[in-house]
Every structure is written in structure tokens, then in C-alpha cells.
Image (cartoon, grey):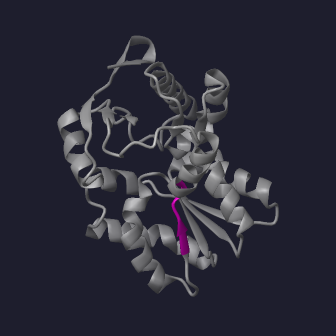
Amino acid sequence: MLYVADQAHVPYGGRPLDEIKSFATEISRFLADNGCRAIIMACNISSATALTSVCELLSPLPVLGVIAPAAERVAREYVGPIGVLATVGTVNSGAYTAHIQRANPLARVVEVPCSKFVPLIEAGEHSSRDAECAVREYLEPLAESGCRTIVLGCTHYPFMLPLLKQAANVMFKNPVTFVDPAEDVVATLSVRAPDLSTESINSGNVLLTTGDEAHFREQTAIFLPGIECKVSTARWIENNKLTM
């Protein structure tokens, strides 16, 4: 696995959509140029803005986003309003509502922008008092709408699941199912690229950051416990090109 964390530019959520598209396109090109045989655009706002054009650019290389697989599943299993917790940019793109209602025109979707989540998680404060307050703030409109299913529309948000589940047990009248789109992406990848290597998860993983390498190394120990990997740096150079 070759992974690029674009920490030089996070959070993406408040950036112009065209700028995010350019970052996602260059990172995808970089991964393809370094021998990747399939690419997961593991960012919701990148998937919303850049997936279609990157698929065309890198065809026939399989390129998967994180929105469509989960959106199509919750649309099929629709029971009551579907909530989406996402970044400001993803909510502004309307991608989840569009994908869900394309699969099920009768589905009602309630999207909530969560500007506080990513900075809290990046700082390792996803179990803090501030995180608890943010969770209650963002779940409130979904509870008022009677949502039974809530999609975690940012790849950071599963780290908030313990607090989200705890708050939902108190705030919602009915049981709530939280959906992590990563699970649907894995299932889709096994269909789109079944010939990928099934070697050990600890075999040759390389994790790159465009930000501070020492800080990223500390984060990987927290967020990927037990996963062996080489941590290094990728650099943005002039004309928005990415290099190792």
C-alpha cells in the first residue's frame, strides 16, 4: 500500500472546490506513476469534486471514491430520513444527496456540516470535552429530523464513533445505524480489482505525508496500531506537482 496524506493542505473542507480537485488529481497521478494498480480516493470532498475526471485521466486504472458505494447501499436499505455528517465542502457539493436520491428518489437526506471534527481528530482530541460538545451540536438536527441511518461523510469521522454512539443513545428516539463508507469501498474494490495482491497487511506499506513527518509518525502509531509501515515525506513543488 502506498498512501499519501496531504497534511500540508488540511483541512480540505473549507477550501475552494476547484483547488481540492487539483490536489486530488495530482495525488492520483503521483500514485499511478509510482506503480499503484488501483487507487482509492479516500476523501469525501475529493471524491465529490475530482473522481469523474481522474477516472477519465487514468483509465483503465481502477479509481474508487468513497461516496457512491455507501450512498447506494443506504438508498437501498432506506428507512426514514438519512443523515450525513460531513465537512463544509462535502455538504456544499451536495454529492451525498445526489447519489442517494439517484438510487432512491423517495429518500430524504439531511446533511450537516461539521467544521470542528477534523481539527479535533488531527490534534488527537477526539475523546475530549470539546469533542463531546461538537458531537451533540451536530447530531441535534439529525435527531430532530428522526434520522435512523447516519453516514460518516468524512474519512476522519469513524474516530468519533464512540462519542457519536454514546450521544445518539440519549438524543434519538429510535436506534441509529452509523455507516462507515470505508467498509463499502473495500467491498467494491474486491469486485473492481480482484487480482490485487493478498499479501500480509504488514508487507511493504509506505505512508507519505506532505506535512510534518515527525507529527505524522506520532499519528500513525495512534491511528494504525500494530500496522508496520515506512513513514516518509512527499513534497509539493512548483506548478502543484508532487514528488518524493
Magenta stretch encompasses residue 180 = yes
Q: Is residue 72 above or below residue 59?
A: below
In screen coordinates, is 192 left or right of 211? right
Q: Is residue 103 located in the magenta-colored stretch of the structure?
A: no
Q: Please state, as top left, top right, bottom left or bottom right, where the C terminus lies in the image.
A: top left
| Residue at the image point whose x is 38% and y is 34% from the top | 6
On the image, the x and y values in percent for residue 114 come to 47, 57
Foreground residue among 96 and 202: 202
Residue, far right: 105
Q: Tag count in the figure?
A: 0
The foreground one among 154 and 193 is 193
x, y percentage for residue 90? Answer: 57, 47
Q: Residue at x 60, y 66 (%)?
A: 83
Report the predominant secondary structure element of the magenta stretch. Answer: strand
The residue at 52%/57% (across/down) is 183
Q: Is residue 188 left or right of residue 127?
A: right
- The residue nearer to you, when weighing 147 against 27, is 27
Measured along the vertical axis of the image, is residue 205 above or below residue 83?
Answer: above
- Whether residue 46 is visible, yes or no, is yes
Report x, y in % for residue 157: 43, 58
Q: Residue at x 28, y 67 (%)?
A: 127
The magenta region covers 177-181
Residue 116 shows in this picture: no
Q: Nearer the viewer, residue 143 or 178?
A: 178
User: Farthest residue in the top direction?
Assistant: 238
Q: Position of residue 75 (x, y in %)?
A: 72, 63
Specify the quadrant of the image occupied by residue 124.
bottom left
**Screen quadrant of the N terminus:** top left
